[in-house]
Amino acid sequence: MSSRQSGRLLTLFNLNTYFSAPRVVPLYINYMQIFIETERLFIRELLPTDDTGMFELDADPEVHRYLGNTPVKTIEQSRETIAMVRQQYLDNGIGRWAMVEKATGNFMGWTGFKLIRDTVNNHTDFYDLGYRIIRRYWGKGYATESAIACRDYGFRQLDQPTLYAMTNVENKNSKKVLEKVGFICKETFLNKDLPHFWFEVNREANKKY
């Protein structure tokens, strides 16, 4: 086997094949697993080499405005976050994924699901959709594009009847993204002492997904 073929054969969920099964595509990218491909994004596993991008993301006070205002101070904190997410891959079979711009290969932030084992708003063991993007990529539709892709992955590949999401009630842009991709705001609740909107999207009620 050549060095080019020494990587893992990756399964891509490609939105261009809307009603088909996931494609098996011979991509050999040094064992990096890509889960979803969209028009402008690769959505892949979070890697230790993403530490610089994660630090740029989470050190920005604007990014953390609705997240408790606790931006990270050191790159070591970002490395610990990556290690935690990669452990979730092993423990739960899923965790947040890196969002990468196809045109440049640049790390843009993260997206995807976290399996929440704790009880939050009277729900336990549910798939929470989230996204967090470096500020220089804001306002370009990337959050919506990734949310649509992950929503469809959740219904088809994870076979979940209902998907969930949460956002701070003051985060109007995040609320707008979730509503745009079909999530319905069900109620307001306290999460870590801050008021949040609770969102759900149901597969049976939305056959188009």
Image (cartoon, grey):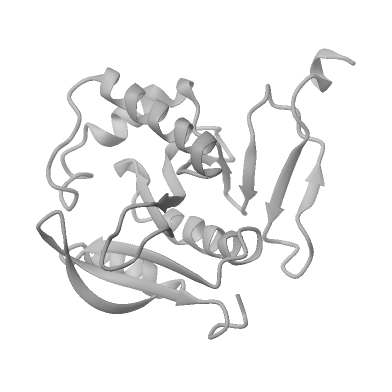
Residue at 72% in and 67% down: 18
Residue at 75% in and 23% down: 7
100 in relation to 152, above or below: above
Q: Is residue 61 visible?
A: yes
Along the horizontal axis of the image, is 14 left or right of 68?
Answer: right
Rendering quarter of residue 80:
top left
Q: Is residue 182 visible?
A: no
Foreground residue among 105 and 4: 4
Q: Quadrant of the C terminus?
A: bottom right
Along the horizontal axis of the image, is 55 left or right of 41?
Answer: left
**Which residue is at the far right?**
1
Foreground residue among 111 and 108: 111
86 in relation to 35, above or below: above
Along the horizontal axis of the image, is 60 left or right of 159?
Answer: left
**Residue 186 location, x and y as percent?**
30, 80
Rendering quarter of residue 71:
top left
**Residue 12 location, x and y as percent?**
71, 47
Rendering quarter of residue 201:
bottom left
**Residue 55 location, x and y as percent?**
30, 27
**Residue 25 location, x and y as percent?**
80, 42
State how many labels appear: 0
Q: Quadrant of the N terminus?
A: top right
41 in relation to 202, above or below: above
Residue at 75% in and 63% down: 17
125 in relation to 4, above or below: below
Residue at 41% in and 26% down: 83
